[in-house]
Image (cartoon, helix red, strand yellow):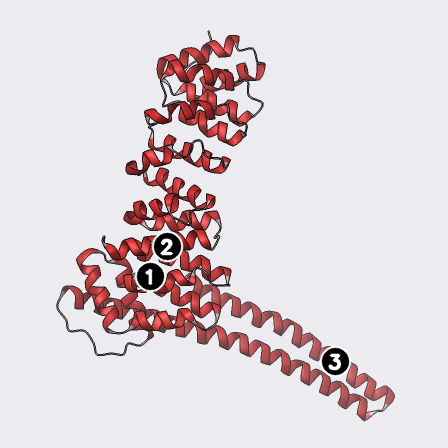
Amino acid sequence: MWRRFGDVAFGSLIGVAITLEAVPLAVLTWRLARRAADELAVPELQATLVGTVASTALGLVLVTGYVLAYQVVSEGRERWLRERREAWVARWIRIMFRGEPPPPGPLDRPAAEALLEVREVLRGTEGEEVAQLVRRYGLAEALRRRAGAGSVSQRLEALEGLARARLPETLPDVVALMGDPEPALRVAAARTAGRILAETPPGPVREEGAEAFARALQRHRLPAGVVEEALLLVEDAAPSVVAHLLHGPDATEAGIRAGLEAVGRFKLLGSLEEAASFVGHRDPEVRAAALRALARMAYVPPDAQGAVLEAIRDPVGFVRVNACRAARLLRPEEALPALWERLGDPSWWVRRAAAEAMARMGEAGAAQLRLAAREHPDRYGRDMAAQALRDAGLGEAA
């Protein structure tokens, strides 16, 4: 509705603006032409001025007419397509749940888009029935061809269609597009591959797809945010993808980091020991990601507790921050002395993380935090401890 009334307002505004330009210009030019003709008696000058204003007015009329016609035609066509698509959605629902016979192929554009919309919504047995209809009408094959050639916009549209169809047999083609020279296509292909992999049932096909997907994520150097988003889209296939990211033959530090982020976000308890093994990795980003994963899963394996304590004194600031957050999961008698020391850290973020960790360690942590607010040798540490006490509702230092 907003688009419809917005188009009308835009068209009216253009019409009024050009009219306000054309009418004064015509009047002014006509008067100047008459005055020049009376004073100079040069018919050629009058004809030139009249021709000039006529051509200018004609150009303005053409521009106005085109803009208004475009608004009317495009809005009308969009409304027609929307109504057709809605009618087809209702028909596909009747076919699925009321036993109405499916139409003969081929499908026109509204019917195909409606079928993909229904496929995007339905899962399970009903979703598989819709997937069979998508295969029956050859939509996936057509989208696959369009995704491989054509303009960037057409290929992006085809990838979106493949993401909505989520057919496992299209995964190899989509994974191959993750190496396309066009950055927008690489990003769209990664997202599409994640959605298809999430719909692939457990078994050898999904394992092969997970391996290919993980290898493509590592090989094609996609932005970190895109990789994390794609990993969130794989849903139940996350453990398989993470295993290949962490220990695959093509494993990279960026891939390991992304895999560890997925371990923490999905809380993959089966990968807990693997995540803990990276706390001492040579790359600080990987160390920080491993510590974040442990903190999110709220558990530090016994074999990794010493590594977490060492990470509290890591030379890299953001690693110390994450180590302090994970240290709240350790035994208080081991963690509190190290966190006390970090209250005097040069980094504000480390001091804050240490104070918050102490505040979340029960009565022992609160008592140590009150003591730090009074007696810590670093004045910034005392201030941070006092602030953390107030923020946690633990009262003021006695």
Where does label 3 land, which residue? 29
Cα separation between marks 3 and 2: 68 Å
> How far across and how far down the image is residue 252, in percent?
45, 46
**Residue drawn at the location 63% of the way across and 81% of the way down:** 59
293 horizontally vs 338: left or right:
left
Q: Which of marks 2 and 1 is nearer the N terminus?
A: 1
- Say which residue appears at 46% left-offset and 68% top-offset: 153
Q: Earlier in the sequence, mark 3 or mark 1?
A: 3
- Secondary-structure class at tag 3: helix
For the residues bearing labels 2 and 1, Cβ distance under 8 angstroms: yes
Residue identified by numbered label 2: 213
- Residue 27 quadrant: bottom right
**Amino acid at the residue labelled 2:** Phe
Position of 203 with respect to 149 (left or right) is left
Measure the C-alpha gap from mark 3 to mark 1.
66 Å
Residue 188 can be seen in this image: yes
Q: Which residue is drawn at 49% across and 30% down?
A: 319
Q: Distance between the residues labelled 2 and 1?
A: 9 Å
Percent position of residue 83, x then y: 32, 70
Residue picked out by circle 1: 171
Against 334, residue 164 (above or below) is: below
Q: Is residue 84 visible?
A: no
